[in-house]
Amino acid sequence: MSTFAAKRLQKEMAKIHQGLAPGIFFVNSPNLQHWQMDIQVLDSNPLYAGKTFRLNFRFSNNYPIEAPEVTFIRAPDREIPMHPHIYSNGIICLDLLSSGNGWSPVQSVESVCMSIQSMLTGNTKNERPEGDEAFVLREGRSVRDIRFVYDDPTV
């Protein structure tokens, strides 16, 4: 891991141990390049009431210039949330997580978790993305290799 990435992650880890935003919990980090975080939706969204979800973060040598790979994972008492932008294999379609226009080096693990919390909070559809079954059958590729097309209905 590059010195810059390692220093940034050490700084973020120190901040995490001082405290996190409500509904965000550090789970573990076997090394600097791989972290797990739990998140809860704190509002009264009935789709996620009482549930906790686990996020897996993988950091490249280019972090924070490059976005981390972030996916939901199954764990004991943890499921992958139903959402129109979350595939059943845990891959999240969120522009913030693309190293293109959505990501900024000012983002952090905590701010990513907060953005995903917000995404879940606003959801009203208990469904997977269109084409979920075909998408998850294409195994063996990195999350970084996926290029989502984001549709902005306001344009």
Image (cartoon, helix red, strand yellow):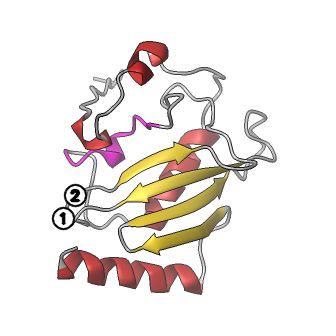
Q: In this view, does 72 lie above or below 68?
A: above
Between 122 and 27, the one nearer to me in the picture: 27
Label 1: which secondary element: loop
On the image, numbered disc 2 is attached to which residue?
Answer: 66
Image: 8 above or below 38: below
Horizontally, residue 45 falls left or right of residue 120, namely right
For residue 130, say whether it is visible. no
Identify the secondary structure beneath mark 2.
loop
Residues drawn in magenta: 91-100
Which quadrant does the N terminus fall into?
bottom left
Magenta stretch prevailing secondary structure: loop
Q: Which residue position is annotated with label 1?
A: 62
The reply to whether discs 2 and 1 touch (Cβ–Cβ < 8 Å) is yes
Q: Residue at x 18, y 64 (%)?
A: 62
Residue 91: image x %, image y %? 44, 37
Query: 114 and 67: which one is in front?
Result: 67
Question: Looking at the picture, how far across and down is residue 32, in whole percent?
Answer: 38, 74
On whether residue 60 falls in the magenta region, the answer is no
Indicate the quadrant where residue 141 lies: top left
Q: What residue type is labelled 1?
A: Asn
